[in-house]
Amino acid sequence: MIKLVRGFKDILPTETALWQYVEATVRELLEDFGFAELRIPILEKTELFARSIGAGTDIVEKEMYTFTDRKGDSLTLRPEATASVVRAYIEHKFYAKDPVCKLYTIGPMFRRERPQKGRYRQFYQINAEVFGLHDPRADAELILLLMKFMNRLDLSGIVLHINSLGCHKCRPHFKDDLKTFLANRSEQLCSDCLRRRDENPLRIFDCKVPTCKETMTDAPSILDRLCSKCRSHFNTVQDVLKMSHIPYETNHRLVRGLDYYTRTTFEVLAGALGAQDAVAGGGRYDGLVKALGGPDQPGVGFAIGVDRLIELLAGQVQGLEKRSHLFIAALGVRAQDRAFQWVQDFRMQRFRTEMDLEDRSLKSQMRRADKLEASYVLIVGDRELDEGAAVLRNMTTKEQERVPLRGLVGFVVSRIKPTTTGRNNEDRR
Ligand code: ATP
Ligand code: MG
């Protein structure tokens, strides 16, 4: 038997309702915030990621699924979405029409990481990106949107961490501080971090090796090094969060795993997830559009890890409310023919309806209805046809009533109004 590739997974029919619910919820919210959906390919030129994510990052150094196609081009399965969204923003000249542009995209990402709980080689992200806005309120608004989403899903036990990574003016000073700090700590760093120490010491904050983590607890703070513009930017972000009653913690060690960030970075963590506790992360990337050959437009965005979000939700909710539905138990050729038509008519009324096409005994049809967890069963055989009325059984209360065959579909629909509500429609603030 051929099995799944390690680190990949199927999302089963028993799980997809939750995925659909999450996606529908986020789409609605994103569109209310003025975002439009962009669908981008899964495959891009390797150079796009190498140039944007940064050569010294884990992703580019060891996690990309890269191959050479028949013409010799180096292609990569996208490990993240921002680079592709920026490419599209530039390629389709969105900025020419309006530099301010809000885009979102949902889909799979690929990273060849060590598979473990909460870490897959194909995982899903919801991405939101805002271009063309320098104002710190744009950063704050994105965080607000993210927290609003978590709130709508009714997630508890999550914390928001924020930081500022400064800009090309102040960050170099901080890098020097770090290098000085790390100069005589070689034996405490892993080989990757030793290599990164000179080129990109900030990366060391993101290393998952325990000794490196330990070493960095005493590291200097970038927040002490911000220039006045970066400081005021960061202060405004915090002011808006406070005004909006969004609790947060500042975390000067939060650098994120991608090199393109400037100023604001943030992450949403959920303790319940264990070691892989980041549910979402994002930040500002003011130099990226230009670095990829576009105009000098700023950007800020986030990515939500859907797999981890689903895991959290599955642990916190009872499951989605099921749509009620109907099973028609039809006995005999005549009743089967009539039932077949009714089934199609009910479905046209947006009512989930099924029947047994094999004309088995009433007992086995009722068993099937039970198995499908039908909320109602409509029973019809020769006798019901002759009498002009079928029997409608409420499977929860076990009550039965007779329903006229004439105008049957409309009558039944009015009796058993479908409940199509999601888990909670109410927005809890
Ligand atoms: P981590 O620190 O957990 O490796 P990251 O910083 O690499 O996360 P990002 O690149 O910022 O993650 O992606 C945003 C989100 O995507 C993460 O917060 C996480 O929820 C999710 N994510 C990242 N990598 C994986 C993975 N291999 N499997 C499942 N989800 C992932
Ligand atoms: Mg990672």
Image: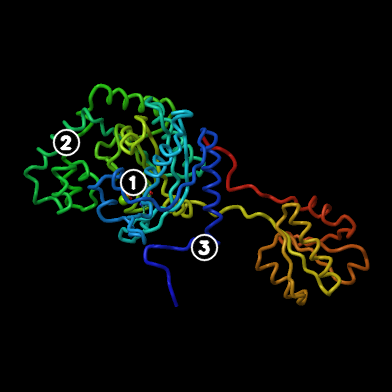
Nearer the observer: mark 2 or 3; the answer is: 2
Q: What secondary structure is found at the residue carrying circle 1? A: helix
Residue 175: mark in rendering: 2
The mark nearer the N terminus, 1 or 3, is 3
- Residue 48 is labelled as 1
Q: Residues within 10 Å of mark 1 (few under 14, many from 20)?
A: some
Is 88 on the left-hand or right-hand side of 46? right
User: Is 320 left or right of 369, judged from the image as shown?
Assistant: left
Say which quarter of the image contains residue 157.
top left
As helix, strand or loop, the secondary structure at mark 2 comes to: helix
Check disc 3 and give the amino acid type: Leu
- Where residue 135 sits in the image (x, y, percent)? 38, 25
Between marks 2 and 1, how big is the CA–CA gap? 26 Å
- Mark 2 or mark 1: name the one nearer the start of the chain: 1
Q: Which residue is mark 3?
A: 12
Mark pair 2, 3: CA separation: 47 Å
